[in-house]
Amino acid sequence: MTAASEPARGAGASAGSRGHRGDARAKTSAAATFALVFGVAGLFSVLTAILAWLGLVLGIIGIILGIVGLKMARRPGVTGRGVSIGGLVLSILAVLIGLGLAAGITTFVNNENAVDRLQTQVDKLRDKLD
């Protein structure tokens, strides 16, 4: 065979299959992606301690989206099972840490001796500033 009679690179059956494969590519579930985003944001918010309440809410939303993402990943043509699991794990961590922080703060605030010690420390610091 001569070079003129051979099909050009990328032509023929392989080019057709490549074009078809590009059209039928699996898409990552949006719920899975958002579960990961909410999980990371929730965990970050909880770890700042100031925004723990926001992290708790974001974690709950992330758990719901993670479950929806897992269910959507079962469908044909949809991926994102690993992303859903990652978002679910981070969201659960955010909720658990947020609840632990809330329980600790509640216990501390309800303990009169601890509040009195904190008030004493604040008064001492205020006296040093004056």
Image (tube, rainbow, N blue to C red):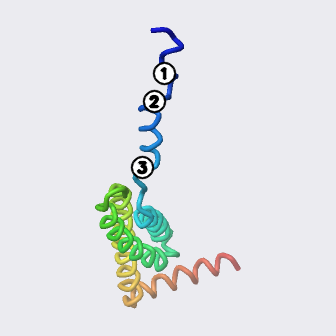
In the rendered view, does 47 fall on the left or right side of 107?
A: right
Residue position marked by numbered label 3 in the rendering: 25
**Which one is earlier in the sequence, the residue at label 1 or at label 2?**
1
Q: At 35% from the left edge and 81% from the top edge, which residue is drawn?
A: 103
- What is the three-letter code of the residue carrying label 2? Gly
Q: Select label 3 or label 2 by which is in front.
A: 2
Q: Mark 3 to mark 2: distance in Å?
A: 21 Å
- What is the three-letter code of the residue carrying label 3? Arg
Q: Is residue 21 above or below residue 108?
A: above
- Residue 65 drawn at (x, y percent): 39, 71
Q: Is residue 26 above or below residue 104?
A: above
- Residue 78 drawn at (x, y percent): 37, 58
Mark 3 lies on a secondary structure that is loop
- Count of all numbered marks drawn on residues in the image: 3
Q: Mark 3 to mark 1: distance in Å?
A: 27 Å
Q: Mark 1 to mark 2: distance in Å?
A: 7 Å
Q: Select label 3 or label 1 by which is in front.
A: 1
Q: Nearer the viewer, residue 117 or 1?
A: 1
Q: Nearer the viewer, residue 16 or 99?
A: 16
- What is the three-letter code of the residue carrying label 1? Pro
Q: At 51% from the left edge and 85% from the top edge, which residue is drawn?
A: 119
- Residue 9 drawn at (x, y percent): 51, 23
Residue position marked by numbered label 1 in the rendering: 7
Q: Nearer the viewer, residue 91 or 79?
A: 79
Residue position marked by numbered label 2 in the rendering: 12
Mark 1 lies on a secondary structure that is loop
